Amino acid sequence: MKRLAVGLMTTPEYNEWLVKRINDNIPGPSQENSQSVEEHLRVVPSELEIIKQDFEKRNTKLEKKIEQMEEEKMNLRLDVDV
């Protein structure tokens, strides 16, 4: 009984070309969109935190407006008294 062993019949040049070809298709790290470690690990605020910050800004604006109106009220009283 005869056996026929069939193996890969490739040349060393082909093997080198194949390895380069496969490795050339692997994308390397892009320098254009690279982020620093700090940027990558930066915590994105949650929706609740964003709403809270917005509320605090509006609250501060309203407090200033109330103070201005109270000053105007005091000035108007002074004008009436005079």
Image: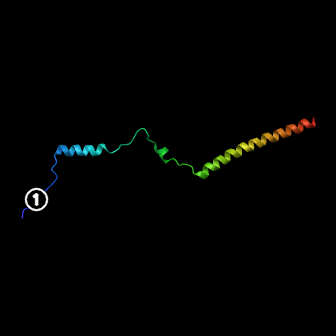
In the image: residue 45, left or right of residue 32 = right
Give the camera-side residue of 78 and 20.
Answer: 20
In this view of the protein, which residue sits in the foreground, 82 or 24?
A: 24
Question: What is the secondary structure assignment of the residue under circle 1?
Answer: loop
Q: Is residue 63 left or right of residue 9?
A: right
Task: Identify the residue shown where x is 47% and y is 46%.
Answer: 40
Using residue 75 as the reference point, say whether residue 13 is left or right of it: left
Give the residue number, with chain letter if any, for mark 1: 4
Residue 44 position in % (x across, y down): 54, 48
Amino acid under label 1?
A: Leu
- From this view, report whether residue 46 is shown above or below residue 17: below
Q: Residue furthest left?
A: 1
The residue lying at 31 percent from left, 44 percent from top is 25
User: In terms of image quadrants, where is residue 80?
Assistant: top right
Furthest toward the bottom, the residue is 1
Q: How is the image coloured?
A: rainbow
Question: What crowding class fits label 1: few (fewer than 14 Cα within 10 Å), some (14-19), or many (20 or more)?
Answer: few
For the N terminus, the quadrant is: bottom left
- Left or right of residue 52, residue 6 in this image: left
Q: Residue at x 74, y 44 (%)?
A: 63
Q: Where, quadrant-wise, is the C terminus in this rendering?
A: top right
* Residue 21 image position (x, y, % from top left): 26, 43
Q: Position of residue 19 (x, y in %)?
A: 25, 46
In the depicted view, which residue is nearer to us: 35 or 10?
Answer: 10
Figure quadrant of residue 23:
top left
